[in-house]
Structure formats: C-alpha cells, structure tokens
Image (cartoon, rainbow, N blue to C red):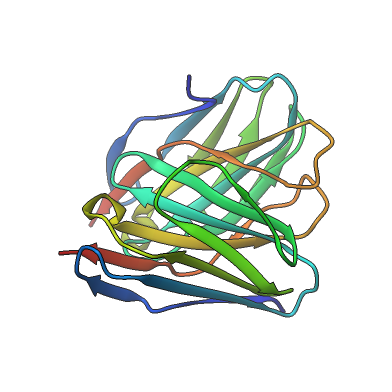
Amino acid sequence: EDQVTQSPEALRLQEGESSSLNCSYTVSGLRGLFWYRQDPGKGPEFLFTLYSAGEEKEKERLKATLTKKESFLHITAPKPEDSATYLCAVQEVGGSTLGRLYFGRGTQLTVWP
Amino acid sequence: SQTIHQWPATLVQPVGSPLSLECTVEGTSNPNLYWYRQAAGRGLQLLFYSVGIGQISSEVPQNLSASRPQDRQFILSSKKLLLSDSGFYLCAWSVLNGGQPQHFGDGTRLSIL
C-alpha cells in the first residue's frame, strides 16, 4: 500500500487559472511533509517542509497547507514557467536518524499561455 | 552553501558491462546519503542509504551495490548490467537529524542496450 497518494496525476491549466494539487498520506505519525518541484531531466528541487496540521508555507505563487491526513499545494495565477512535476513526500516519526522519505508519484502540471 | 554533484549526466552501456556512478556533496559534514531510481509513472524508489563511511543499507535486492569510501562521496556500482537497470538515478543528501528535507543532484540517465 502506498503511504503517499497524489492527485491528479496530470493537470493542465491556462495561465492565470488557479488550482490545487492534493497529497494524502497514511503514515501513523508524521515527522514532516515535503514538497518538491521536478523539471524534465533534472533532480527534484526542494520547495517546502510542513510539520503540523494547520501550518502553511508560501513561495511566490505557491502555498502549501497541511491537515492531519493531507496536504494541498495551491497555485495562484500560474505562469508557463510553473510547468513541472510536483512531488510530495512524508517522513514518519520513528526516532531514526535516517530521514527516510516516502514519495508520491507526482502531479504533472502544464500551464499554457 | 551545500551543493551535490552527480556524474555522468547520461550514460549508454551494453548489457553485461560494469557500472560506476559517482556522487559528491560539498559544504556539509557527515550527511546521510541516498541513491534512488526513478521510473516513469512509478515515483522514486530508494535503493541504498548511508549514515556514515562504510555504512550501507540496501532497500531492494538487485543487481546493484553502493559504497561510501569518504564522508561526502557515494558510489553506485554494478558488475554486470541488466536491461532492467535502465532508468534515472538520483543521489540525495540530508543532515543527520530527522525532519529535514533531502536535497537531490541532477541525476544520471542510464540506458542499457
């Protein structure tokens, strides 16, 4: 069973059309939830960390929010340069220094002019 | 600031040939290091991780091995490549404490012929 599920798998938006990406998780205790952006042929680029329900983080047109079972990445007035795959990952509470992350399969966002 | 380097960026190898992919991190000491493989539509699969020199843990039994000869160097190897080893290989690092994000290199696209 996947610990992290992202939806939708793909999303096409017109420039300026705001929307949200969803990340739901099933780990028993959340140490942290992480959002990444990945451009084609590149490694994931870290965007945000969220630690507790109710927390929000913002960066330019992106805002990430967290509840007890899911996170949303809100994209306000997107531009074509926001086109990328957005990955969500969670880290479980467990006392390990490993810092293992469980990744979702991503949402491929395309913003057209 | 910390940086992570992976090379080569692309590699085409015949079946049965050996493999060595290298990853180095700069600007931090004693990081956790990780090797992932990313297949289209399947997300990131953790292959190996290391919490220190010479300490390697394998997540998935396979045709690959990893080594950490120096604090900030992580090597992915194979003695004989299989067709199924094709993919996008990513190296990442994080600080030792939990709750921190992993930071990725730009990956190696490996094609087996």
The quadrant in which the C terminus of chain B is found is bottom left
The quadrant in which the N terminus of chain B is found is bottom right
How far across and how far down the image is residue B47, in percent?
Answer: 51, 49
How far across and how far down the image is residue A81, in percent?
Answer: 36, 63
Closer-to-camera residue (A75/B96): B96
In the figure, A102 relative to A110: above or below?
above
Q: Is residue B30 left or right of residue B90?
A: right
In the figure, B95 relative to A4: above or below?
below
Q: Residue furthest left?
A: B113
Residue at 47% x, 61% y is B90
Res A76 seen here: no
Q: How many marks?
A: 0
How far across and how far down the image is residue A2, in percent?
Answer: 48, 24
Closer-to-camera residue (A57/B37): B37
Residue at 19% x, 69% y is B14
Q: Is residue B15 left or right of residue A101?
A: left
In the figure, A104 relative to B28: above or below?
above
Residue at 29% x, 38% y is A10
Closer-to-camera residue (B81/B73): B81
Res B84 seen here: yes
Closer-to-camera residue (B14/B35): B14
Q: Is residue A2 left or right of residue B8?
A: right
Residue at 41% x, 60% y is B89
Which corner quadrant of the image does residue B92 belong to?
A: bottom right
Which corner quadrant of the image does residue A95 belong to?
A: top right
Q: Is residue A21 left or right of residue B2?
A: left
